Structures are given as C-alpha cells and as structure tokens.
Amino acid sequence: MRKVKLAFWLILLGLLGLVFWQNQTFFLEKRGIGIDYFIGSYHTPELQIALYFLIFFLVGLLVSYFSSLSERFVARKTIRKLNDELANARKKVSDLEAGIASQQAADSNAGQTVATAQPADAAE
C-alpha cells in the first residue's frame, strides 16, 4: 500500500509539473488582483500567477485545517473515553475469569476429597 501511495503522489506531481511546464508563459506572467468596494478599492501588487495559485492553495489548506480542529479534539476526547471504558471492561473480564478459575479449582478440590473419602467409607 505504501508503494501505491508513493506511485500515486509521484504521478500526481508529474502531471502538475507537466501542466506547469506546458503553460509556463501563463504562470510566469505578472498580474495584480483588484477588489472594488462601494467605499473604495484595493489592488494587490503585481505577482506571478503561479504565486497566486500557491497562496490561495495554502489559505484553503489552513482554513480546512482550522475548521476541522474542533472535530479532532472531540474525536480525541471520545477515543480516550472509549479506551478507558475498554480498559475497565477488560479488567472486569479478567477479574471474572480469575473468580471462575478459583471457583473451578475449589470445586475440583472438593470433588477430589469426596471421591477419596467415599472408598474409605465403603471399606468400613
């Protein structure tokens, strides 16, 4: 599975590199972004379009990371709680198994004393 993942990412990077290589003039062209508000306007400095792609990709990555952060904390808390419950259940099972084993040992010891006592009684 590791090799498949590695091959997938290499193919994906190769395809992205091919797209960049074939459209080099577009990605290296400098452009500015302008936003016009009702009260004013804002224009960014002229940067290469490839940098805009990279900036917007990283901003999207950060937004998705921080939006799922609370869900990960809740999941971590739930996992911790379930692991504690599992440990308690395993401890209870091992205690019950130990109780059953001691009960079976006591029953087998009592059965052996009864079995050895009966022939002695029959001889009298």
Image (cartoon, rainbow, N blue to C red):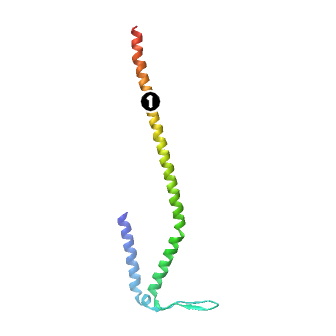
Q: Nearer the viewer, residue 91 or 37?
A: 91
| Image quadrant occupied by the N terminus | bottom left
* Residue 35 against residue 96 in the figure, above or below: below
Q: Residue at x 52, y 71 (%)?
A: 66
Q: Residue at x 61, y 92 (%)?
A: 40
| Image quadrant occupied by the C terminus | top left
Instruction: Tell me if 38 is positioned left or right of 24 in this view.
Output: right
Q: Nearer the viewer, residue 15 or 52?
A: 52
- Total label count? 1
Q: Residue at x 45, y 41 (%)?
A: 94
Image location of residue 8, percent across then percent down: 39, 70
Given the current orientation, which residue lies at the most extreme right position?
Answer: 38
* Residue 98 against residue 14 in the figure, above or below: above
Image location of residue 81, percent across then percent down: 52, 54
Amino acid identity at mark 1: Gln
In the figure, residue 117 lies in which quadrant?
A: top left
Q: Residue at x 52, y 60 (%)?
A: 75
Residue that label 1 marks: 104
Given the current orientation, which residue lies at the most extreme top position?
Answer: 124
Instruction: Tell me if 64 is positioned left or right of 22 in this view.
Output: right
In the figure, residue 10 lies in which quadrant?
A: bottom left
Image location of residue 82, percent across then percent down: 51, 53
* Residue 97 against residue 118 in the figure, above or below: below
> Label 1 neighbourhood size at 10 Å, few (<14), some (14-19), many (20+)?
few
Mark 1 residue element: helix
